[in-house]
């Protein structure tokens, strides 16, 4: 077993981004540490040799997982073979439980210690999976303030390290940026299927807002690193002007918007920490939605709402995720075309107050450094 080799397994771009920040801190504290595994551009930039990439596993919803099963099984077989060959000191899983649980079982079956950074949201659904975590994972490193109490109550070794997004969003750098009046941000996701499900509805919302506000409203679509502009343009109404922004400085782009329309996921906590009112949307297949309604045990899907314990960001899911409803929700936060006072301005101010409290609840900066120190301490146990 290689004492300096750590396997990091991120199954999607949001996890890759946060794992990349963690790896940079790990290598700062332990320059001789080497990392291999599965990841994307952020882990690669931090120094990981990605034997497998997150693009190989880009699915959403329960029905969609079934259609991707042969590809996922081939990928898992490749990971198992690489773990057996390389014998890393430990495996650090990052989010993506549907796939990473299988990696956990493979690694622990080989006698390789397994740790979990950003563990699965078993508090939201499928609570029975805590037994799997107790059996295969030595320690969890949580980034949401309400998680440790849940995991400890179920007998798991857990540490709260704070949220990496507090550092990534870097509020002191953003708070001086004034939103551009009438600018609406669009964040349709990083997975092909979710983009295909949501962006046409985003386009319909844009059409409605253009009818109401004319050229006083503008649209900026923040594309994910793996999403070509041509793919997005093909799903957007050609007669509605839109700017496709590169992901290079995503938080400044978010902050420049008066409000944002976003796919549910990590992005809706990013927009919250950036102080931008956001309408949260999501669509999966009808079958996946039917199953989800029966399994999910929390009242909201947005992390911002879950941390705040109330609906700060409106959520439009499944059949409610229509262009008309999206436009209505966004309209409440936009300046009126003639510059007159609007009742929505008070609603927007209330959301901004809530987002200041959200930043307080997510803790102090330095999450990645704290996580790196505790991961290295765990490896020495």
Image (spheres, rainbow, N blue to C red):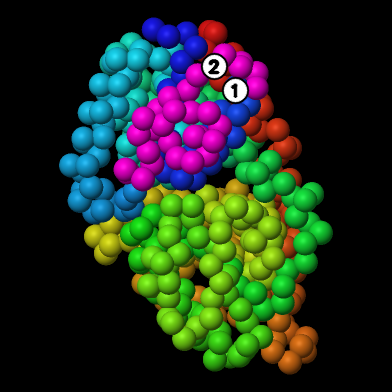
Q: Which residue is mark 1?
A: 26
Residue at image position (72%, 73%) is 180
The residue where tag 2 is placed is 33
Q: Is residue 81 left or right of residue 54?
A: left
- Residue 156 placement (x, y as % from top left): 47, 23
Quadrant in which residue 242 is drawn: bottom right
Badge 2: residue crowd in 10 Å (few <14, some 14–19, many ≥20):
some
Please state if 140 lies on the left or on the right of 128 as rendered.
Answer: right
Residue at left offset 60%, top offset 52%: 248
Q: Secondary structure at mark 2?
A: loop
Q: In this view of the protein, can residue 92 be seen by the observer?
A: no
* Left or right of 354 in this view: 268: left
Q: Position of residue 292 (x, y in %)?
A: 33, 54
Seen at 27% across and 23% down, the residue is: 80
Sooner in the amino-acid sequence: mark 2 or mark 1: 1
Q: Is residue 310 left or right of residue 181?
A: left
Q: Position of residue 342 (x, y in %)?
A: 73, 84
Q: Is residue 36 magenta?
A: yes
Against 373, is 282 above or below?
A: below
Q: Which disc number belongs to residue 61?
A: none
CB atoms of marks 2 and 1 within 8 Å: yes
Above-or-below relation of 103 to 324: above
The magenta stretch is 28-57
């Amino acid at each position: 077993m290689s004492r300096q080799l750590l396997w990091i397994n991120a199954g999607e771009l949001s996890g890759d981004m946060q794992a990349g920040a963690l790896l940079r801190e790990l290598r700062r504290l332990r320059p001789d540490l080497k990392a291999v595994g599965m990841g994307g551009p952020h882990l690669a930039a931090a120094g990981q040799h990605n034997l497998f990439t997150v693009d190989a596993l880009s699915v959403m919803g329960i029905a969609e997982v079934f259609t991707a099963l042969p590809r996922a099984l081939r990928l898992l077989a490749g990971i198992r073979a690489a773990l057996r060959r390389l014998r890393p000191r430990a495996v650090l899983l990052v989010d993506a439980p549907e796939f990473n649980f299988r990696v956990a079982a493979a690694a622990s079956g080989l006698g390789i210690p397994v740790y979990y950074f950003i563990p699965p949201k078993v508090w939201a659904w499928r609570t029975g999976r805590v037994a799997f975590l107790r059996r295969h994972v030595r320690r969890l490193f949580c980034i949401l303030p309400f998680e440790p109490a849940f995991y400890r109550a179920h007998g798991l070794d857990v540490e709260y390290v704070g949220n990496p997004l507090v550092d990534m969003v870097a509020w002191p750098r953003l708070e001086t940026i004034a939103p551009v009046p009438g600018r609406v941000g669009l964040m349709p996701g990083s997975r092909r299927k979710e983009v295909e499900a949501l962006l046409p509805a985003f386009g319909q919302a844009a059409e409605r807002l253009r009818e109401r506000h004319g050229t006083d409203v503008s649209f900026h679509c923040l594309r994910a690193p793996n999403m070509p502009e041509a793919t997005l343009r093909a799903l957007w109404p050609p007669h509605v002007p839109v700017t496709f922004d590169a992901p290079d400085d995503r938080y400044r782009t978010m902050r420049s918007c008066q409000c944002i329309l976003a796919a549910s996921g990590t992005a809706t906590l990013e927009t919250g920490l950036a102080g931008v009112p956001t309408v949260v949307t999501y669509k999966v297949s009808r079958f996946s939605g039917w199953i989800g309604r029966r399994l999910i045990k929390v009242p909201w899907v947005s992390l911002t709402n879950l941390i705040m314990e109330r609906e700060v960001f409106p959520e439009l899911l499944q059949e409610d995720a229509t262009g008309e409803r999206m436009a209505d929700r966004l309209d409440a936060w936009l300046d009126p075309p003639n510059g007159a006072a609007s009742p929505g301005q008070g609603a927007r101010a209330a959301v901004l107050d809530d987002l200041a409290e959200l930043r307080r609840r997510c803790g102090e900066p330095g999450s990645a450094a704290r996580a790196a120190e505790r991961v290295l301490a765990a490896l020495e146990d």
